[in-house]
Amino acid sequence: MQKILIIGGGLAGCEAAWYLAERGYSVQLVEMRPLASSPAHVSAQLAELVCSNSLKSESLDTGAGLLKFELRHYGSLLMQVADMAKVPAGAALAVDRELFAAEVTRRIKAHPNITVENAVQQTIPAAPAILACGPLAHDSIAAEILQLTGGALHFVDAISPVIAADSVDMGKAFFAGRYGKGGDDYLNLPMEEAEFDCFYAALMAADTVAAHAFEDEKVFESCMPIEAIAARGRETLLYGPMRPVGLTNPHTGRRPFAVVQLRLENRERTAYNIVGFQTKMSIPAQKLVLRLIPGLEDADFLRFGTIHRNTYVDAPACLDASQMLIAREGVFMAGQITGVEGYLESMASGIMAAMQLCAHLNGCDAISFHPETAFGSLQRHIAGEFSTPYTPSNFHFGMVPPLAERVRGKSKRKEAYSQRAIERVESSPKQG
């Protein structure tokens, strides 16, 4: 059987490789690490999670909850591993990052139909192939993609710091989930108004990394650096990553003025990431500003926050409805480079590209996912139906058609969207 080449061992590439291999296709997965790396990666493992360890909510009244259902329905490898590697995170699915990547790597390399090659792909391969080289593709292949697609676009992404658990002053912290949901899965660092004002002033005065050419590009909203959020005004932090609603400080019996939440990084409970604190502050500034948070005065930083540029193509102009390059028949694209944003969306894009490649190889028409589903909404997004000019996006319920009947209550309405999508997915014929 003809070998299928997949470039990139990230989330999309691994999902595509697994989907195809499970259906008997011979797959060669090419990953540049450890021979070359990117500004965001730190290991040589496949499917490394770089920005956060959270795969968001499991609840079906959220877009992430529905997307997880559809991923599991289509046999997602990464959802299987995430369920195995999960750490406590309330209603969300968060994973031990190192365990997650190690297990994905083990399963991919152990599959009899997959060969993993560590190499820097210099050119766009001949068909059949999937380009899942990510938004931080190596310069050599990125240049060819740029030429073939008529131009690439950029947005700025940022990463939160990680601190050692034993460096947190537990006398100032408390475990709780908002509104009592999720038990004690989040470690909360409460702040009084004077403490918040001191922190805010230092944040606004903090040095940031030296300006790069890409810093005037679009910043993806859900990865907005904490100092960029703060620059919009003091209240944006209190209604954003530092909102205190749903929490009571057991040390005072009152709701804090502001709160910083920490989420577990690993099963050993030795590390936490600072939720919502993506940053482009310089390392000295991070040490100074973040140690003004009560409980983090002696914080031991295991990873500092960083900022980097992500690249994506103008998908509506250069890809057809099946994610195939218009200029190169039989070569498909998947992952963040197509303009889907988020871990789950990248996984879905990889599975979708693999399904479309199967259809192409079998001489079938491109697959049209139902517009009421998350996969269908992502397909419509890549086709450019939701934004002009084209910009990266997560899946959200604003992408799906309205319900036939009005449902009162935001949560119930979102659950109705999910239930409708589930019925569509379960009644559709199996693909591949």
Image: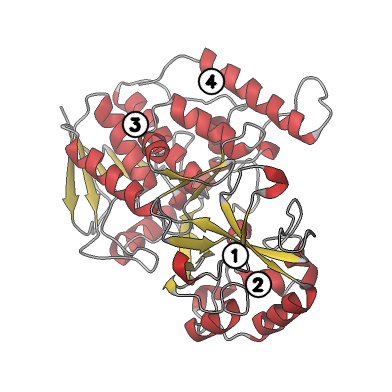
Which residue is disc 3 drawn over? 357
The residues tagged by marks 2 and 4 sit, at their Cα atoms, a distance apart of 39 Å
The residues tagged by marks 3 and 4 sit, at their Cα atoms, a distance apart of 20 Å
In terms of sequence position, does the residue under pointer 3 or pointer 2 come before the other?
A: 2
- Vertical relation: 154 (above or below) 408: below
Marks 2 & 4, CB-CB < 8 Å contact? no
Which residue is disc 1 drawn over? 219
Residue positioned 57% across, 24% down in the render: 370
Which quadrant: the N terminus? top left
Marks 1 & 4, CB-CB < 8 Å contact? no
Residue 99: mark in rendering = none
The residues tagged by marks 1 and 2 sit, at their Cα atoms, a distance apart of 9 Å
Marks 1 & 2, CB-CB < 8 Å contact? yes
Q: Nearer the viewer, mark 3 or mark 1?
A: 1
Q: Secondary structure at mark 2?
A: helix
Q: Residues within 10 Å of mark 2 (few under 14, many from 20)?
A: some
The amino acid marked with disc number 3 is Leu
Which residue is disc 2 drawn over? 228
In terms of sequence position, does the residue under pointer 1 or pointer 2 come before the other?
A: 1
The amino acid marked with disc number 4 is Val
Q: Dividing the picture into quarters, in which one does residue 50 lie?
A: bottom left
Q: Residues within 10 Å of mark 4 (few under 14, many from 20)?
A: many
In terms of sequence position, does the residue under pointer 1 or pointer 4 come before the other?
A: 1
Q: Is residue 175 visible?
A: yes
Residue positioned 40% across, 50% down in the render: 267
Task: Count up the numbered dots.
Answer: 4
The amino acid marked with disc number 2 is Ala
The amino acid marked with disc number 1 is Val
Residue 425: mark in rendering = 4
